[in-house]
Image (spheres, rainbow, N blue to C red):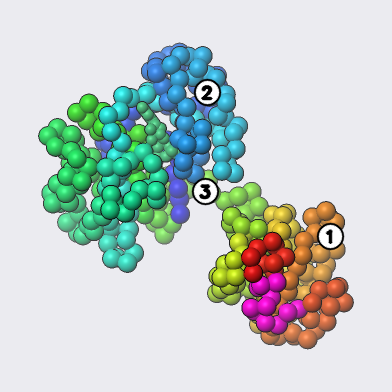
């Protein structure tokens, strides 16, 4: 999944002729100041944090300025902010347009219908998840003819547009469809699409490019994706490590068991915060390395759920005990282990010697870790 920052998404939009506010990117308050001073960004203007998370409007990461001084101050206050865990390094400055209405428009894939889908709502400018379902119109779009007059007319009706703005929507939808197809997007979203005078302007842009198509788009190769710093380290060490929102660490082996373990924890009211898939490692050093990485994510409790196959239970136990010894006292956390399969007895013995009990039942072990993490089980 290659998620483009707003300004990159808008650059793509511009290529296809989608109407946009006049604007430019700044990476320091000085740069922001000079964009305004030179008129590259007209006043009044909007200053927007270029982070991948949504909800910037509500979160103070979108600000308005009426003067050069205000623009500079806003830029200084947003740059360096941490917005939903992401440091703000870039700003987009744009002219502030007088908007009459905020609409929502998106093209994405409906995996159940196995078709692209056009989503439209007259309630734009807020997260689509918070819009009532009956206020959202969804139309499957057959990929061969693409968007036809029928879908466009229905969208215009849903959005309450007629006359010149409806014509503008026609052209915009044609362009949006081309972005979706030619850029191999899995999502293109304009929220809000603003009614400005008799025209329409894309005030925001969200473009996500399908991973499997990245070979067709070398231009996106450089773009940083949404890996966290720890995930980046893990990637270099070839460890499958993913951070989530919760507080329980999960160490399992194989994608299937790892996913099932996350599901079981959720079932018992736990919130997985990070998971690590040991895969088919048979090297205790690698297990130690992976475990130390997990410790850096500071989980409240950790659930080790291993089925010994290629990765033998005693290998994991050795690596684990070794790693536990290296974790600083202040960073230690309760650990619940469940190891079954190849060399189970040896593994359990190694753990026992280090004071860790293996709980054979999946249910009991999962409940016990959820309790240790302060959850509800
Ligand atoms: P998001 O909250 O992260 O999706 O950020 P958006 O780019 O959607 O901006 C949030 C809100 O800022 C929009 O819904 C608009 O209400 C407002 N906004 C952004 N650009 C303009 C503009 O040019 N004029 C006006 N009046 N409001 C704007
Ligand atoms: Mn938006």
Residue range highlighted in magenta: 358-368
Q: Residue at x 32, y 58 (%)?
A: 109
Report which residue position mark 2 lands on.
Answer: 74
Q: Residue at x 21, y 60 (%)?
A: 142
Q: Main secondary structure of the magenta part?
A: helix
Residue 34 placement (x, y as % from top left): 49, 16
Q: Secondary structure at mark 3?
A: loop
Distance, label 3 to label 2, CA atoms, is 26 Å
Looking at the picture, tell me which residue is in the foreground, 33 or 367.
367
Q: Is residue 274 magenta?
A: no
Q: Give left or right: position of 291 versus 64.
A: right
Residue closest to the far right: 353
Report which residue position mark 1 lands on.
Answer: 326
Q: Give left or right: position of 322 versus 184.
A: right
Badge 3: residue crowd in 10 Å (few <14, some 14–19, many ≥20): few
Residue 354 placement (x, y as % from top left): 86, 73
Q: Residue at x 26, y 32 (%)?
A: 195
Q: Give left or right: position of 302 versus 30.
A: right
Q: Give left or right: position of 207 versus 338.
A: left
Report which residue position mark 3 lands on.
Answer: 225
Q: Secondary structure at mark 2?
A: helix
Q: Earlier in the sequence, mark 1 or mark 3?
A: 3
Distance, label 1 to label 3, CA atoms, is 31 Å
Residue closest to the far front: 376
Q: Is mark 1 within 8 Å of ligand 1?
A: no
Q: Which mark is residue 72?
A: none
Q: Nearer the viewer, mark 2 or mark 1?
A: 2
Q: Is mark 2 within 8 Å of ligand 1?
A: no
Q: Residue at x 69, y 61 (%)?
A: 374
């Amino acid at each position: 999944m290659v998620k483009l920052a707003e300004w990159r998404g808008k650059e793509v939009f511009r290529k296809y002729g989608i109407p946009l506010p006049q604007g430019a990117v700044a990476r320091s308050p000085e740069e922001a100041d000079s964009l305004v001073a030179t008129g590259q960004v007209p006043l009044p203007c909007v200053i927007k944090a270029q982070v991948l998370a949504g909800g910037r409007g509500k979160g103070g990461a979108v600000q308005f300025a009426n003067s050069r001084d205000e623009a500079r101050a806003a830029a200084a206050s947003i740059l360096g902010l941490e917005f939903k865990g992401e440091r703000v390094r870039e700003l987009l400055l744009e002219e502030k347009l007088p908007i009459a209405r905020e609409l929502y428009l998106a093209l994405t894939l409906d995996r159940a219908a196995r078709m692209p889908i056009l989503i439209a709502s007259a309630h734009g400018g807020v997260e689509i998840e918070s819009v009532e379902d009956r206020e959202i119109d969804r139309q499957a779009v057959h990929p061969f003819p693409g968007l036809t007059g029928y879908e466009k007319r229905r969208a215009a009706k849903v959005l309450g547009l007629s006359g010149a703005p409806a014509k503008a929507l026609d052209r915009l939808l044609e362009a949006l469809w081309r972005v979706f197809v030619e850029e191999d997007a899995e999502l293109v979203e304009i929220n809000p699409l603003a009614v400005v005078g008799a025209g329409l302007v894309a005030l925001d842009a969200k473009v996500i490019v399908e991973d499997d198509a990245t070979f067709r788009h070398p231009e996106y190769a450089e773009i940083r994706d949404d890996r966290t710093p720890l995930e980046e380290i893990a990637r270099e060490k070839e460890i499958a490590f993913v951070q989530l929102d919760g507080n329980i660490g999960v160490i399992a082996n194989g994608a299937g068991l790892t996913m099932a373990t996350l599901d079981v924890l959720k079932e018992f009211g736990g919130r997985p915060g990070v998971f690590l898939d040991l895969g088919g490692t048979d090297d205790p050093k690698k297990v130690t390395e992976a475990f130390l990485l997990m410790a850096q994510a500071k989980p409240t409790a950790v659930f080790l759920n291993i089925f010994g196959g290629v990765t033998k239970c005693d290998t994991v136990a050795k690596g684990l005990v070794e790693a536990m010894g290296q974790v600083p006292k202040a960073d230690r956390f309760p650990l619940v282990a469940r190891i079954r399969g190849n060399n189970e007895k040896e593994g359990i013995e190694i753990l026992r010697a280090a004071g860790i009990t293996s709980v054979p039942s999946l249910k009991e072990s999962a409940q016990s870790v959820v309790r240790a993490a302060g959850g509800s089980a």
